[in-house]
């Protein structure tokens, strides 16, 4: 699985960005330039400067050009996804956690959203209407009841929850829930405090609406990067360190022999 990481940007300056150590380690030691690719596929040859003590900074005219293409956004985080050696796809997230892109007509739309998992995430994950607006564009209440989410380990078909009001009888899509969502959390090791980056991947007649979900730990590092192999021996200590929601599922199955989610 490709390396992926979220970098918090307190004050993004044109003179450069000092990279976290774990991201620096993904760049070859003697590398003086990396390629940064935006969502349109535009490539920027960004200079890399060694600052001592294994610290590195990206800067230069190409870095400024990359920032200028997003200067109307309130940038708070950058998501670096390693495509290959010295080449990264970079997603830009606003201070509200939105990944804003432009459609063919030049209008802004919400392509992705970063949220933090809570204790309730195991049962239901609330999401902004702006990310799920396509699901809300339905003719009947029986339309768009499900979506498909794709994680680093497991994909699942999930239920879409809607918020109804007198002004909108068809409802506005507001998140994911159901046994499929719970299974997705379980199989992809989502814990309270994890960061989840949802990105809309379009729809197909066979698979409903598709959403890619990148999962990060509290430090912003993708779980697929930090995952370690563990044996299946229940007596070993590392297999006892399970999220609380996993323990709830295992207890319920043991007592009832049914895997029912409420």
Image (cartoon, rainbow, N blue to C red):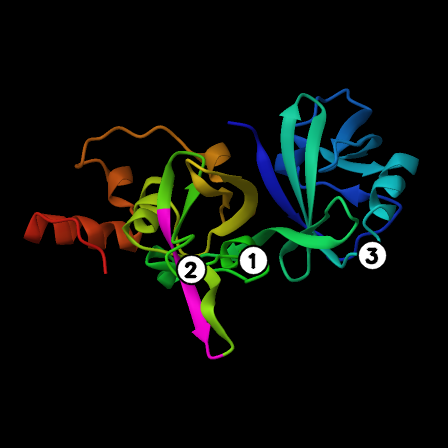
Q: Is residue 221 visible?
A: no
Tag count = 3
Q: Residue at position x 47%, y 51% from top? A: 194
Is residue 101 depicted above or below 74 in this figure? above
Q: Is residue 146 visible?
A: yes
Image quadrant assignment for residue 42: top right
- At mark 3, the secondary structure is loop
x, y percent for residue 84:
65, 22
Q: Residue at position x 40%, y 31% from top? A: 228
Is residue 22 depicted above or below 170 in this figure? above
Q: Quadrant of the C terminus?
A: bottom left
Is residue 81 depicted above or below 129 in this figure? above
- At mark 1, the secondary structure is helix
Look at mark 2 in the image and give the residue it sits on: 140
Look at mark 1 in the image and give the residue it sits on: 133
x, y percent for residue 55:
73, 36
Q: Which residues are drawn in magenta?
A: 158-166
Distance between the alpha carbons at the discs numbered 3 and 2: 37 Å
Camera-side residue: 134 or 249? 134
Q: Is residue 230 magenta?
A: no
Tell me which numbered mark, 3 or 2, is placed earlier along the sequence. 3
Look at mark 3 in the image and give the residue it sits on: 72
For residue 177, side relative to residue 41 (left or right): left
């Amino acid at each position: 699985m490709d390396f992926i990481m979220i970098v918090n940007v307190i004050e993004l300056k044109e003179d450069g960005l000092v990279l976290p150590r774990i991201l620096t380690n993904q760049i070859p030691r003697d590398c003086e330039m990396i390629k940064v690719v935006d969502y349109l596929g535009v490539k920027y040859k960004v200079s890399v400067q060694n600052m001592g003590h294994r610290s590195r900074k990206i800067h230069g005219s190409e870095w400024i050009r990359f920032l200028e293409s997003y200067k109307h956004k309130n940038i708070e985080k950058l998501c670096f996804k390693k495509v290959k050696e010295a080449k990264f796809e970079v997603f830009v997230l606003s201070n509200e956690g939105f990944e804003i892109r432009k459609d063919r007509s030049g209008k802004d739309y919400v392509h992705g959203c970063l949220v933090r998992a809570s204790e309730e995430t195991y049962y239901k994950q609330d999401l902004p209407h702006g990310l799920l607006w396509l699901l809300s564009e339905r003719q009947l209440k029986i339309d768009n009841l499900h979506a498909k989410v794709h994680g680093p380990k497991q994909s699942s078909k999930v239920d879409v929850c809607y918020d109804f009001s007198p002004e909108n009888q068809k409802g506005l899509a507001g998140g994911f829930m159901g046994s499929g969502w719970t299974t997705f959390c379980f199989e992809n090791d989502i814990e309270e405090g994890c960061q989840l980056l949802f990105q809309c991947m379009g729809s197909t007649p066979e698979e409903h609406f598709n959403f890619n979900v990148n999962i990060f730990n509290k430090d912003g590092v993708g779980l697929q990067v930090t995952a370690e192999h563990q044996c299946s021996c229940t007596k070993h200590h590392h297999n006892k360190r399970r999220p609380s929601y996993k323990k709830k599922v295992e207890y319920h199955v043991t007592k009832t022999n049914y895997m029912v989610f409420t």
